[in-house]
Amino acid sequence: AILFFVMEPLFTLLGAGDYVQDCVDYFTPVVLTMPVALTGVVMANILRSEGASRKAMYSQILSAVLNMILDPFFIYDYGLGWGLAGAAWATGISMSVSTLLLIYWYFFSGKTYLRIDFNGFRLDKELDMAIFRVGFPASLEMVVVSVVSMIANILLVEVDPANGVAIYSTTWKIIQVVMIPIMGMGSSIVPVCAAAYGLRKFDNIKMSYRFAIFSITAIMAVVLILVAFFADYIVMLFTYSDSTAALRPDMTYGLRLSCLFIIFVPWGFVTAGLFQSLGMGFKSLICTFFRKLILLPIAGFLGIYYGSMEMFWVGVVIAEIVGTLVIGVWGLFVLASLMRQRRGDVPSKLYS
């Protein structure tokens, strides 16, 4: 309910400019369908926690395919003709249908390892706090990212008043697509290491941590070579109109330069996942906060001082590399302490 009252000023802070109303039109259906969609997200994560990641993937595929089918009908005049709002409704309905599939699996199929039953349900303070210690910091991470995005947009207007926000935000969307394998590996390590931690198999935690970092780094090395080589063509997919063609040079430069820091990102993401699996949610939050905190002054100073988007991107690369290295080293110290705990040198209560 609060979002309905803060949408317009929020989008203004995010740099929507003349498109605030379009953003509101899109976001309103998203807010209305959010409770059902978030229920689906929670249930999909429960599936992953019991090792049924394939079922969770099926629910996501169902949502994506249905979204693609509904989009044209909801958006264009030969269907409902709802425009941007139609796109949002298509997304919300698709995610809701996906949630219904998850509800069927858990409440009616009887084929899941865990059974959700509300009979005799009562709150468990200790368990609730354990969930809160991981879940609350993870939620705050999203808030930190959004706040940093707002401040970055303000800095970008100073660097390039005409196109700065468009160049950065669109290029960053491409970067996020490139980093999907990293995010997947960072998420997948959480249930694996959490299970190993619960069984006190600390060697398995160390092995999983190393495997996740080395495997995804090797995969990303190949992906980033392809991205750097085909950057012009990738950017063209997002700047095909005459009005956006002028953004291509800066976007291509930013995308190619970002490959320099993305190769380090697996270490940071996997370390954050390790912290979450050990119940160290606030350490994961500090990781995100630190990376984003150093990004703003470095990128902002270089971009504004030299008055160019190129130097802003240089600042982003420097900040991301430094931030990731610090987080990765911290992860190694935590892992070393965990191994000492296995030998009995450290009291287990430090990691409870």
Image (cartoon, helix red, strand yellow):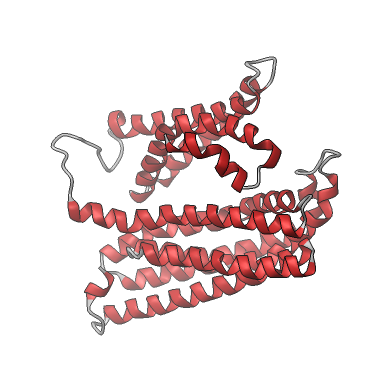
Q: Residue at x 43, y 38 (%)?
A: 2
- The quarter holding residue 231 reads bottom right
110 or 327, nearer to the observer: 327
Q: Residue at x 50, y 73 (%)?
A: 328
x, y percent for residue 126: 19, 56
- The quarter holding residue 54 reads top left
Q: How many marks?
A: 0
> Is residue 45 toward the left or the right of residue 73 in the image?
left
x, y percent for residue 267: 53, 69
144, above or below 40, in the image: below
Q: Residue at x 31, y 60 (%)?
A: 195
x, y percent for residue 289: 49, 64
- Judged from this view, the residue extending furthest toward the bottom is 345
267 or 168, nearer to the observer: 168
257, above or below 322, in the image: above
x, y percent for residue 52: 38, 45
Q: Residue at x 28, y 31 (%)?
A: 107
**Quarter in which the C terminus is drawn:** bottom left
